[in-house]
Image (spheres, rainbow, N blue to C red):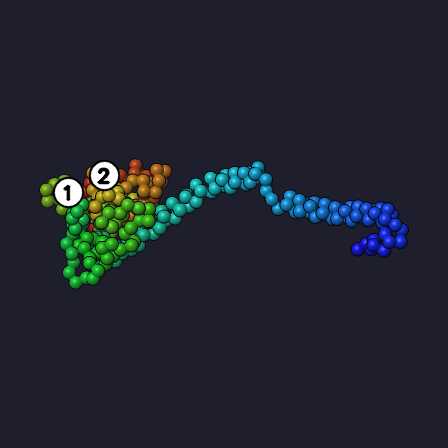
Amino acid sequence: MVWVGFIGRRRGPGRWRLIVKSQTAQIRRSWGSRSSVLRSGVLRSGDCSAFTLVELLVVIGIIGVLISILLPSLNKAQNYARQVQCSSNMRSVGQSMLIYANQFNGYLFPPNKGWPGAGQYPPIIDGYNPTQYDVWTFYVLRQWDHPVIICPSDLDLNESRHSYIVNAHLLDHSMKSASDASNAGAPDIKYSSVLPAGYDPTNVVVMGEKISNAYDYYMENTDFDTKVEQYRHGPLLGSNYLMLDMHVEIQLPAAVKGTLDPWALKATTTQP
């Protein structure tokens, strides 16, 4: 604080006004320098914390590029995980088929236990809650719509609630022998059957994947193009198939067709 009053009384009005003017100018200069420091400090602080529009657009662009790179890899990983889960489901069904074969003389599943068609339902098996339908999956898995009979890549299930379809030739070979002399005496193909020359349990299909809107539980060789889903896991991979030795492999349709009906040739003897 500047005490200008007393000075003004001693030295006269003119001198007093000069002193006041000088002191006022000094105060203004002092406060002006302080405000400029404050203003410059605020500007420097803002410069350090803010983004320009160009910088923001560059960051957004980089994020977009990263997403475009990562999304295909993520989708590929998800598809692979579903294919592996489908393969695991098939192996589980195969193990249940072996248990069934132990009890029923080598047959892996019962015949003529399928779904009648769209808008229809198979007979209900009495004494079960929840309801159990008379289809082969009930006899093999003890539940007609067991989760392992559904492929996670099959996203359009109908009311028959199954993704897999078994090879009917495993059962109907000797059924045909009654009307076809060339098959006379040929046995059904069981888990323990000796196959025709050129075939072994590693290349005979037991079960494949069906088209989502199909109701069939059994496939014939002639039905392959209309009932079997040939590219469930992509056009470069194909679909999963359970083989007679109970391993699962993914194959394209061209490699599968020749493994559906090896017993068109007369089968040989059956192992004890």
Image point (82%, 49%), residue name: 20
Q: Nearer the viewer, residue 10 or 65?
A: 10
Residue 48, position as x, y percentages in the image: 64, 45
* N-term mark: 2 or 1: 1
Q: How many marks?
A: 2
Comparing marks 2 and 1, which lies closer to the viewer? 2
Q: Is residue 106 above or below residue 250?
A: below
Image point (32%, 52%), residue name: 89
Image point (20%, 57%), residue name: 132
- Which residue position is annotated with label 1? 183
- Which residue position is annotated with label 2? 226
Residue 152, position as x, y percentages in the image: 33, 49
Secondary structure at badge 1 equals helix
- The answer to whether residue 265 shows anywhere in this view is no
- The answer to whether residue 12 shows anywhere in this view is yes
Residue farthest toward the right in the current orientation of the protein: 11
Q: Would residue 266 appear left or right of 21 to someone viewing this image? A: left
What's the residue type where badge 2 is placed? Thr
- Cα separation, mark 2 vs mark 1, equals 26 Å
Quadrant of the rendering where the N terminus is positioned: bottom right
